[in-house]
Amino acid sequence: MRTRKLGRSGVPVTELGFGAAGIGNLFTPVRDDEAYAAVDAAWDAGMRYFDTAPHYGIGLSERRVGEYLRSRPSTSYTLSTKVGRLLEPHDGKGEDRAGGFAVPAAYRRVWDFSAAGVRRSIEDSLGRLGLDRIDVVYLHDPDDHAEQAFGEAYPELERLRGEGLVSAIGAGMNQAGMLTRFVRDTDIDVVLCAGRYSLLDQGALTRLLPAAAERGVSVVIGGVFNSGLLADPKQGATFDYTLASHEVLTRALKLKALAERHGTTLRAAALAFPFGHAAVTSVLVGTRSAAEVADTVQQFETPVPAEFWQEARDLNLLAADVPTPERENHA
């Protein structure tokens, strides 16, 4: 699987990366053996970029990813995690359903974008991972904490990079606006943009992607299936974590029919689409089993003919100015 570098950092990532929220028991439980089989399948398929966060399963995802990667040479993969939520012991009963994860509510998340909070978060993550280094650190969802994120957390990440404790720094969010500010006003290496550059939502195209290309900042894309609709468009499917509207569902079904007419699949097109823009370096996909990994890799390697993109434009399913991949696949 091909690799690219994150901005000016020189940190390599594979074009397809393993998003580890799913093996943090996102929505439903995943057994340990299922989680490790998923990561193992990703490794066997050539993925060498793994992304996790304290938020995912309140530490479970980091522990599982770390346990697997400890068996691999430390220079053979790239690992990213995130800061902004500290985990504090909690005597809550039941599960972390409000946080979105099917795990015991033994910890609670505490927002903290202070400099000290950043340092502590990384130390805590290293402890859960059982590793001696983290390659990439993202500020995680600083939407409501902009002042502290820009004034304290970002400068601390810059110091950590200068000290050589991390190799690349960035921000990860479900919006493009603040990520554009990070690109323009800081010296980050990468942004992780979830759900805002897909077949159904090109919000990142207006400002974020041009700014990233101009500044030499890499963009990693998450949420290419828009929380499920582009994976399997049907009544009851979700778009951006809520029930898809009739209009959006209709558009997704038209894209699916068009893909099938051109001998490909909607999922293959969704995975290929972000690479039409030069600023995009990698796509992260959350998978929770070896079977899901195998299917994702198969779709990633499935050719998407140039005629599909042209007809999508002709039918106004894609805007005329949206850049689309010039090559047929990314195998």
Image (cartoon, helix red, strand yellow):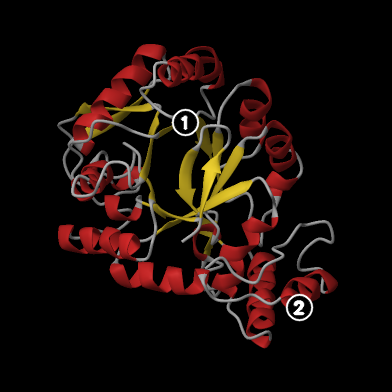
**101 vs 195, nearest the viewer:** 195
Residue 49 numbered mark, or none: none
Callout 2 crowding tier (Cα within 10 Å): few <14, some 14–19, many ≥20:
few
> Percent position (x, y) of residue 295?
41, 73
* Residue 123 in the figure: left or right of residue 181: left
Q: Nearer the viewer, mark 2 or mark 1?
A: 1
Callout 1 crowding tier (Cα within 10 Å): few <14, some 14–19, many ≥20:
many
* Residue 244 in the figure: left or right of residue 155: right
> Percent position (x, y) of residue 290?
29, 68
Give the residue type that dot 2 points to. Glu
> Percent position (x, y) of residue 159?
44, 14
**142 vs 183, nearest the viewer:** 183
Label 2 SS:
helix
Rendered image quadrant of residue 285: bottom left
Seen at 50% across and 73% down, the residue is 299
Give the residue type that dot 1 points to. Ala
* Residue 310 in the figure: left or right of residue 37: right
Rendered image quadrant of residue 18: bottom left
Q: Earlier in the sequence, mark 2 or mark 1?
A: 1
Q: Which residue is mark 1?
A: 168
> Percent position (x, y) of residue 105?
20, 40
The answer to whether 55 is drawn above or below residue 324 in the figure is above
Contact, CB < 8 Å: mark 2 with mark 1? Answer: no
Seen at 31% across and 24% down, the residue is 121
Residue 106 seen by the camera = yes
Seen at 28% across and 58% down, the residue is 39
Residue 307 numbered mark, or none: 2
Seen at 26% across and 24% down, the residue is 123
**184 vs 226, nearest the viewer:** 184
Label 1 SS:
strand
